Amino acid sequence: MARRSFKAGALALIVGVLAGAACGSTRLLYWNIQDGMWDGQTDNFNRFVAWVQKQSPDICVFAEVRTKRQTGKMDHVKDESQRILPAGWPKLAARYGHDHVWISSDNPKCYMQGITSRFPIESVAKDLVPTGSGWARIRVGTNVLNIVTVHLNWAPWGHGCKTDAERKASAAKFGGDLARRDEIETVLKGSFFTVPDASNQYWVVAGDYNARSPVDARMYDIPLDSPRYAVHRWLAESTPLVDLMHEWLPNDFHVTGGAKSRIDYVYLTRGLYDHVEEARVVVDRYTRPTYSGVSDIWRPSDHRPILVDFDFRWARQLQNSAGR
Protein backbone atom coordinates (compact mmCIF):
# COMPACT_ATOMS: atom_id res chain seq x y z
CA MET A 1 0.00 0.00 0.00
CA ALA A 2 1.49 3.33 -1.05
CA ARG A 3 1.60 5.72 1.87
CA ARG A 4 3.98 7.76 3.92
CA SER A 5 6.83 5.63 5.32
CA PHE A 6 8.09 5.69 8.90
CA LYS A 7 11.35 4.66 10.52
CA ALA A 8 11.36 3.03 13.90
CA GLY A 9 11.80 5.19 16.95
CA ALA A 10 10.24 8.12 18.71
CA LEU A 11 11.60 10.74 16.31
CA ALA A 12 9.99 8.99 13.36
CA LEU A 13 6.67 8.88 15.18
CA ILE A 14 6.80 12.65 15.72
CA VAL A 15 7.72 13.23 12.08
CA GLY A 16 4.84 10.99 11.06
CA VAL A 17 2.32 12.93 13.11
CA LEU A 18 3.48 16.24 11.65
CA ALA A 19 3.50 14.87 8.10
CA GLY A 20 0.04 13.39 8.53
CA ALA A 21 -1.37 16.62 9.88
CA ALA A 22 0.18 18.57 7.04
CA CYS A 23 -1.11 16.37 4.22
CA GLY A 24 -4.50 15.56 5.72
CA SER A 25 -3.82 11.83 5.70
CA THR A 26 -5.10 9.66 8.57
CA ARG A 27 -4.66 5.92 9.01
CA LEU A 28 -7.08 3.79 11.01
CA LEU A 29 -6.46 0.20 12.11
CA TYR A 30 -9.24 -2.10 13.29
CA TRP A 31 -8.50 -5.53 14.78
CA ASN A 32 -10.12 -8.06 17.10
CA ILE A 33 -7.04 -9.14 19.04
CA GLN A 34 -8.68 -12.18 20.72
CA ASP A 35 -8.66 -12.28 24.49
CA GLY A 36 -6.52 -9.19 24.96
CA MET A 37 -3.83 -10.41 22.55
CA TRP A 38 -3.38 -13.70 24.44
CA ASP A 39 -0.38 -14.53 22.27
CA GLY A 40 1.31 -11.26 23.20
CA GLN A 41 1.64 -12.27 26.84
CA THR A 42 4.47 -14.65 25.94
CA ASP A 43 6.90 -11.92 24.81
CA ASN A 44 5.68 -8.78 26.62
CA PHE A 45 3.71 -7.87 23.47
CA ASN A 46 6.95 -7.14 21.58
CA ARG A 47 5.81 -8.63 18.26
CA PHE A 48 2.44 -6.92 18.57
CA VAL A 49 4.04 -3.54 19.26
CA ALA A 50 6.55 -3.96 16.43
CA TRP A 51 3.78 -4.84 13.97
CA VAL A 52 1.59 -1.89 14.98
CA GLN A 53 4.60 0.44 14.74
CA LYS A 54 5.24 -0.84 11.22
CA GLN A 55 1.66 -0.03 10.17
CA SER A 56 1.97 3.46 11.74
CA PRO A 57 -1.74 3.98 12.45
CA ASP A 58 -2.99 7.30 13.76
CA ILE A 59 -6.01 5.63 15.36
CA CYS A 60 -6.51 2.01 16.44
CA VAL A 61 -9.84 0.38 17.20
CA PHE A 62 -9.43 -2.95 18.97
CA ALA A 63 -12.00 -5.55 20.00
CA GLU A 64 -11.44 -7.87 22.99
CA VAL A 65 -9.00 -5.58 24.78
CA ARG A 66 -9.17 -7.35 28.15
CA THR A 67 -6.73 -10.10 29.11
CA LYS A 68 -8.97 -13.12 29.55
CA ARG A 69 -6.78 -16.18 29.91
CA GLN A 70 -3.53 -17.04 31.58
CA THR A 71 -0.33 -16.95 29.58
CA GLY A 72 -0.15 -20.00 27.35
CA LYS A 73 -3.23 -21.57 28.93
CA MET A 74 -6.99 -21.72 28.45
CA ASP A 75 -7.58 -21.11 32.17
CA HIS A 76 -9.23 -17.78 32.90
CA VAL A 77 -7.40 -15.17 34.93
CA LYS A 78 -9.38 -15.10 38.17
CA ASP A 79 -7.54 -12.35 40.04
CA GLU A 80 -8.36 -9.00 38.42
CA SER A 81 -5.09 -7.55 39.70
CA GLN A 82 -3.21 -10.13 37.61
CA ARG A 83 -4.77 -9.06 34.32
CA ILE A 84 -2.31 -7.20 32.10
CA LEU A 85 -5.09 -5.48 30.18
CA PRO A 86 -7.10 -3.26 30.18
CA ALA A 87 -5.20 -1.49 32.99
CA GLY A 88 -1.95 -1.81 31.03
CA TRP A 89 -3.23 -0.20 27.84
CA PRO A 90 -1.77 3.29 28.43
CA LYS A 91 1.76 1.85 28.72
CA LEU A 92 1.22 -0.60 25.86
CA ALA A 93 -0.18 2.05 23.48
CA ALA A 94 2.63 4.46 24.36
CA ARG A 95 5.11 1.90 23.07
CA TYR A 96 3.73 2.33 19.54
CA GLY A 97 3.28 6.08 19.81
CA HIS A 98 -0.28 6.52 21.04
CA ASP A 99 -0.73 8.67 24.14
CA HIS A 100 -4.52 8.45 24.31
CA VAL A 101 -6.56 5.40 25.30
CA TRP A 102 -10.31 4.84 25.70
CA ILE A 103 -12.06 1.64 26.77
CA SER A 104 -15.71 1.07 25.82
CA SER A 105 -16.86 -0.44 29.09
CA ASP A 106 -15.98 -0.91 32.75
CA ASN A 107 -17.92 -4.16 32.91
CA PRO A 108 -15.47 -7.08 33.30
CA LYS A 109 -18.04 -9.54 31.96
CA CYS A 110 -18.33 -7.97 28.50
CA TYR A 111 -16.16 -8.07 25.39
CA MET A 112 -14.43 -4.75 25.99
CA GLN A 113 -13.38 -2.73 22.98
CA GLY A 114 -10.84 0.06 22.96
CA ILE A 115 -9.46 2.96 20.98
CA THR A 116 -5.88 4.22 21.08
CA SER A 117 -4.86 7.36 19.25
CA ARG A 118 -2.22 9.97 18.59
CA PHE A 119 -4.99 12.50 19.17
CA PRO A 120 -7.15 13.15 22.27
CA ILE A 121 -10.25 10.96 22.59
CA GLU A 122 -13.58 12.27 23.88
CA SER A 123 -15.74 9.61 25.49
CA VAL A 124 -19.42 10.03 24.52
CA ALA A 125 -21.13 6.78 25.57
CA LYS A 126 -20.18 3.39 27.00
CA ASP A 127 -21.99 0.06 27.41
CA LEU A 128 -24.49 0.67 24.62
CA VAL A 129 -25.26 -3.07 24.73
CA PRO A 130 -24.30 -5.80 27.24
CA THR A 131 -21.27 -6.76 25.14
CA GLY A 132 -19.77 -3.33 25.81
CA SER A 133 -20.02 -1.36 22.58
CA GLY A 134 -19.28 2.35 22.89
CA TRP A 135 -18.97 5.71 21.16
CA ALA A 136 -16.10 8.20 21.18
CA ARG A 137 -15.01 11.25 19.20
CA ILE A 138 -11.57 12.17 17.90
CA ARG A 139 -10.67 15.50 16.35
CA VAL A 140 -8.02 15.22 13.62
CA GLY A 141 -7.15 18.74 12.53
CA THR A 142 -10.46 20.32 11.51
CA ASN A 143 -12.16 16.94 11.08
CA VAL A 144 -14.19 15.21 13.79
CA LEU A 145 -14.44 11.42 13.64
CA ASN A 146 -17.26 9.72 15.53
CA ILE A 147 -16.12 6.17 16.23
CA VAL A 148 -18.56 3.50 17.38
CA THR A 149 -16.99 0.25 18.55
CA VAL A 150 -18.91 -2.98 18.09
CA HIS A 151 -18.70 -6.51 19.46
CA LEU A 152 -22.01 -8.31 19.06
CA ASN A 153 -22.88 -11.48 20.96
CA TRP A 154 -21.31 -14.62 19.53
CA ALA A 155 -23.93 -17.19 20.61
CA PRO A 156 -26.22 -18.96 18.10
CA TRP A 157 -29.10 -18.54 20.56
CA GLY A 158 -30.89 -15.45 21.80
CA HIS A 159 -30.65 -13.65 25.10
CA GLY A 160 -32.16 -15.10 28.26
CA CYS A 161 -31.72 -18.79 27.45
CA LYS A 162 -30.82 -20.59 30.68
CA THR A 163 -31.01 -24.28 29.82
CA ASP A 164 -29.58 -26.41 27.04
CA ALA A 165 -33.11 -27.06 25.79
CA GLU A 166 -33.85 -23.34 25.62
CA ARG A 167 -30.60 -22.63 23.82
CA LYS A 168 -31.20 -25.41 21.30
CA ALA A 169 -34.74 -24.22 20.58
CA SER A 170 -33.61 -20.62 20.18
CA ALA A 171 -30.72 -21.53 17.88
CA ALA A 172 -33.11 -23.52 15.66
CA LYS A 173 -35.09 -20.31 15.17
CA PHE A 174 -31.97 -18.19 14.51
CA GLY A 175 -32.28 -16.58 17.92
CA GLY A 176 -28.65 -15.47 17.98
CA ASP A 177 -28.84 -13.71 14.63
CA LEU A 178 -32.05 -11.92 15.57
CA ALA A 179 -30.55 -10.90 18.91
CA ARG A 180 -27.52 -9.45 17.15
CA ARG A 181 -29.81 -7.51 14.84
CA ASP A 182 -31.48 -6.01 17.91
CA GLU A 183 -28.06 -5.27 19.42
CA ILE A 184 -26.75 -3.32 16.44
CA GLU A 185 -30.01 -1.35 16.31
CA THR A 186 -29.61 -0.52 20.01
CA VAL A 187 -26.00 0.54 19.48
CA LEU A 188 -26.88 2.93 16.66
CA LYS A 189 -30.00 4.27 18.38
CA GLY A 190 -27.72 5.16 21.27
CA SER A 191 -25.15 6.86 19.05
CA PHE A 192 -25.59 7.57 15.34
CA PHE A 193 -29.35 8.19 15.41
CA THR A 194 -29.10 10.61 18.34
CA VAL A 195 -27.15 13.15 16.27
CA PRO A 196 -28.99 15.47 13.84
CA ASP A 197 -27.61 15.25 10.30
CA ALA A 198 -25.27 12.39 11.32
CA SER A 199 -25.33 10.98 7.79
CA ASN A 200 -23.48 14.09 6.60
CA GLN A 201 -20.80 13.78 9.28
CA TYR A 202 -17.79 11.48 9.64
CA TRP A 203 -18.75 8.20 11.35
CA VAL A 204 -16.91 4.90 11.74
CA VAL A 205 -18.79 1.85 13.06
CA ALA A 206 -16.16 -0.86 13.37
CA GLY A 207 -15.98 -4.19 15.08
CA ASP A 208 -16.72 -7.88 15.36
CA TYR A 209 -20.33 -8.27 14.26
CA ASN A 210 -20.34 -12.08 14.53
CA ALA A 211 -22.70 -12.02 11.56
CA ARG A 212 -22.48 -12.67 7.86
CA SER A 213 -23.58 -10.30 5.16
CA PRO A 214 -25.95 -10.98 2.24
CA VAL A 215 -23.51 -9.26 -0.11
CA ASP A 216 -21.26 -12.29 0.46
CA ALA A 217 -24.06 -14.83 -0.08
CA ARG A 218 -22.28 -16.37 -3.06
CA MET A 219 -19.59 -17.59 -0.66
CA TYR A 220 -21.96 -19.30 1.77
CA ASP A 221 -24.40 -22.17 1.48
CA ILE A 222 -27.07 -19.97 3.06
CA PRO A 223 -30.29 -18.83 1.31
CA LEU A 224 -30.40 -15.11 0.63
CA ASP A 225 -33.57 -14.69 2.68
CA SER A 226 -32.09 -16.42 5.73
CA PRO A 227 -32.31 -14.70 9.15
CA ARG A 228 -28.56 -15.30 9.40
CA TYR A 229 -28.16 -12.12 7.36
CA ALA A 230 -30.43 -10.11 9.69
CA VAL A 231 -27.73 -7.78 11.07
CA HIS A 232 -26.34 -6.54 7.77
CA ARG A 233 -29.69 -6.56 6.02
CA TRP A 234 -30.95 -4.17 8.71
CA LEU A 235 -27.87 -1.96 8.29
CA ALA A 236 -28.43 -1.82 4.51
CA GLU A 237 -32.13 -1.07 4.79
CA SER A 238 -32.21 1.20 7.83
CA THR A 239 -28.98 3.22 7.77
CA PRO A 240 -26.95 5.21 5.24
CA LEU A 241 -23.74 3.49 6.32
CA VAL A 242 -21.37 1.98 3.75
CA ASP A 243 -19.71 -1.43 4.12
CA LEU A 244 -16.13 -0.28 3.50
CA MET A 245 -14.45 -3.42 2.19
CA HIS A 246 -17.39 -4.48 0.01
CA GLU A 247 -17.68 -0.99 -1.42
CA TRP A 248 -13.92 -0.69 -1.98
CA LEU A 249 -13.49 -4.10 -3.63
CA PRO A 250 -17.01 -5.32 -4.44
CA ASN A 251 -15.88 -8.35 -6.41
CA ASP A 252 -13.63 -9.71 -3.67
CA PHE A 253 -14.46 -11.77 -0.59
CA HIS A 254 -12.69 -10.35 2.44
CA VAL A 255 -12.05 -13.14 4.94
CA THR A 256 -11.64 -11.73 8.44
CA GLY A 257 -12.62 -14.65 10.69
CA GLY A 258 -12.28 -18.41 10.86
CA ALA A 259 -13.90 -20.93 8.52
CA LYS A 260 -13.49 -18.56 5.57
CA SER A 261 -16.00 -16.10 6.94
CA ARG A 262 -16.29 -12.32 7.04
CA ILE A 263 -17.53 -11.22 10.45
CA ASP A 264 -15.44 -8.06 11.04
CA TYR A 265 -16.64 -4.90 9.34
CA VAL A 266 -15.84 -1.23 9.11
CA TYR A 267 -18.93 0.79 8.20
CA LEU A 268 -18.60 4.46 7.23
CA THR A 269 -20.86 7.34 6.37
CA ARG A 270 -20.73 8.08 2.64
CA GLY A 271 -18.95 11.40 3.15
CA LEU A 272 -16.15 9.70 5.07
CA TYR A 273 -15.94 6.85 2.56
CA ASP A 274 -15.39 9.42 -0.15
CA HIS A 275 -12.09 10.29 1.55
CA VAL A 276 -10.79 6.70 1.56
CA GLU A 277 -7.41 6.52 -0.10
CA GLU A 278 -6.78 2.81 0.41
CA ALA A 279 -8.28 -0.10 2.35
CA ARG A 280 -7.36 -3.73 2.86
CA VAL A 281 -7.52 -6.75 5.14
CA VAL A 282 -3.96 -7.34 6.32
CA VAL A 283 -2.66 -10.90 6.21
CA ASP A 284 1.10 -11.12 6.52
CA ARG A 285 3.70 -13.26 8.28
CA TYR A 286 2.59 -11.99 11.67
CA THR A 287 -1.19 -11.66 11.32
CA ARG A 288 -1.86 -14.94 9.48
CA PRO A 289 -3.84 -16.99 12.03
CA THR A 290 -2.06 -20.12 13.28
CA TYR A 291 -3.72 -22.52 15.68
CA SER A 292 -2.05 -22.39 19.10
CA GLY A 293 -3.04 -25.88 20.18
CA VAL A 294 -4.83 -24.41 23.20
CA SER A 295 -8.64 -24.52 23.24
CA ASP A 296 -9.97 -22.21 20.48
CA ILE A 297 -7.10 -19.73 20.55
CA TRP A 298 -5.08 -18.76 17.49
CA ARG A 299 -1.80 -16.88 17.20
CA PRO A 300 -1.76 -13.92 17.14
CA SER A 301 -5.57 -13.80 16.79
CA ASP A 302 -8.43 -15.68 15.18
CA HIS A 303 -9.32 -12.48 13.33
CA ARG A 304 -7.54 -10.47 10.66
CA PRO A 305 -6.98 -6.70 10.89
CA ILE A 306 -8.43 -4.08 8.56
CA LEU A 307 -6.38 -1.02 7.61
CA VAL A 308 -7.85 2.10 6.01
CA ASP A 309 -6.25 5.38 4.94
CA PHE A 310 -8.25 8.58 4.71
CA ASP A 311 -7.03 11.60 2.77
CA PHE A 312 -9.00 14.72 3.65
CA ARG A 313 -7.38 16.80 0.89
CA TRP A 314 -9.90 15.48 -1.59
CA ALA A 315 -13.19 13.60 -1.84
CA ARG A 316 -13.90 10.83 -4.31
CA GLN A 317 -17.02 12.42 -5.78
CA LEU A 318 -14.78 15.25 -7.03
CA GLN A 319 -12.52 12.88 -8.95
CA ASN A 320 -12.98 12.19 -12.63
CA SER A 321 -13.93 8.78 -14.01
CA ALA A 322 -10.28 7.79 -14.54
CA GLY A 323 -10.36 5.90 -11.22
CA ARG A 324 -9.52 6.25 -7.58
Image (tube, rainbow, N blue to C red):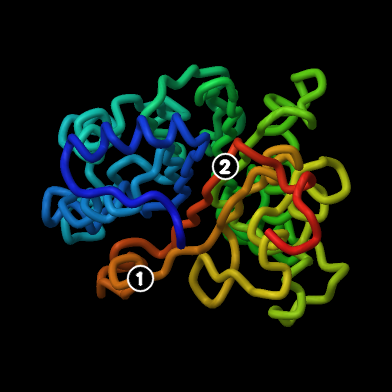
Of residue 65 and residue 20, the one placed in the foreground of this image is: 20
Residue position for label 2? 311
Question: Relative to 178, is 187 on the left or the right?
Answer: left
Helix, strand or loop at mark 2 = strand
Helix, strand or loop at mark 1 = loop
Disc number for residue 185: none
Q: Residue at x 31, y 74 (%)?
A: 291
Crowding near pointer 1: few (<14 within 10 Å), some, many (20+)?
few
Of residue 290 and residue 73, the one placed in the foreground of this image is: 290
Q: How many marks?
A: 2
Crowding near pointer 2: few (<14 within 10 Å), some, many (20+)?
some
Please determine whether, in this image, residue 261 is positioned above or below residue 121: below
Q: Nearer the viewer, mark 2 or mark 1?
A: 2
Q: Residue at x 52, y 48 (%)?
A: 309
State whether residue 83 appears in this view: no
Image coordinates of residue 222 in percent, x first then y, are 76, 76
Residue position for label 1? 284
User: Of the residues shown, which amino acid type is indicated by label 1?
Assistant: Asp
State whether residue 15 appears in this view: yes
Please determine whether, in this image, residue 77 is positioned above or below residue 122: below
Image coordinates of residue 158 in percent, x first then y, are 67, 50
User: Of the residues shown, which amino acid type is indicated by label 2?
Assistant: Asp
Q: Residue at x 56, y 56 (%)?
A: 278
Question: Relative to 275, is 88 on the left or the right?
Answer: left
Please determine whether, in this image, residue 34 is positioned above or below residue 268: below
Image coordinates of residue 36 in percent, x first then y, are 31, 47
